[in-house]
Image: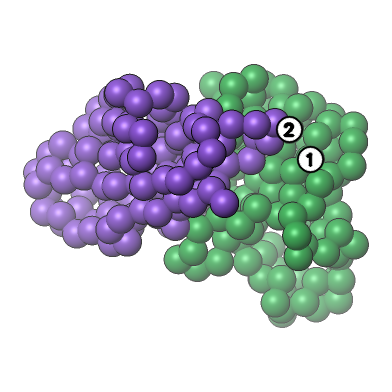
Amino acid sequence: GAVVSQHPSWVICKSGTSVKIECRSLDFQATTMFWYRQFPKQSLMLMATSNEGSKATYEQGVEKDKFLINHASLTLSTLTVTSAHPEDSSFYICSAKTGGYEQYFGPGTRLTVT
Amino acid sequence: EDQVTQSPEALRLQEGESSSLNCSYTVSGLRGLFWYRQDPGKGPEFLFTLYSAGEEKEKERLKATLTKKESFLHITAPKPEDSATYLCAVLPSGGSYIPTFGRGTSLIVHP
């Protein structure tokens, strides 16, 4: 149980374009989902927390207008990177919280902006 | 400020050579401590949650223990497939559900 999927697993886009990443909880309802960014050989950096039906809460230093998060249902959250630039290239991982304290992570999305 | 420090940063073992990974934490009240395994290019995989000092949990060759200041992840007779980065995270008391993650221990098990 507690399976989280992400789509796509990898994406290459041109500078200036927007990219949407989907995160789904497959076998449970997630009232809270999280979006992380991870640089090579570094730990997870929390970008934002999203609750179903309400606006996401962004961590300090994360641009709200650049990283648009929508938590439209109890099983789906999306992250849209708008006007992507090469410095946005990274590994993006979502996670979802069940009724307990644990977070269950998706497999991640590798974004490369050329 | 909540802090999580994992040591060592990297660990190389021979197959069958048991060892332990350490996670030291400073937090204002602990609701839970989590261990995750992360393979290269993948998201973290949940392993254990520990809630109180003295608690232990096991899964195959892994055993996690908890004291008031640190947690250990013991790996008994490791195999090459145990090679991964192991992440520790702590969730402090309070209303937030956001844990603080350590930087991880990269484990390589040689056959």
Kind of residue sitting beneath label 2 = Thr
Which chain has been coloured purple in this picture? B
Residue occupying the point 65% across, 31% down: B94
Instruction: State the residue in front, A15 or A35.
Output: A35
Q: Quadrant of residue B93?
A: top right
Residue occupying the point 70% across, 31% down: B95
Which chain has been coloured green in this picture? A
Q: Is residue B38 left or right of residue B64?
A: right
For the N terminus of chain A, which image quadrant?
Answer: top right
Kind of residue sitting beneath label 1 = Ser
Residue occupying the point 90% across, 32% down: A53
Q: Which residue is mark 1?
A: A50
Give the crowd class for mark 2: few <14, some 14-19, many >=20 residues within 10 Å. Answer: many
Where residue A6 appears, x then y in whole percent?
66, 44
Q: Is residue B35 visible?
A: yes
Where residue B18 appears, x then y in whole percent?
12, 43
Residue occupying the point 42% across, 45% down: B25
Q: Which residue is mark 2?
A: A32
Real-space CA distance between mark 1 and mark 2, rounded to the nearest whole angstrom = 6 Å
Q: Secondary structure at mark 2?
A: strand
Colour treatment of the image: by chain
Mark 1 and 2 residues: CB-CB less than 8 Å, in contact? yes
Q: Secondary structure at mark 1?
A: strand
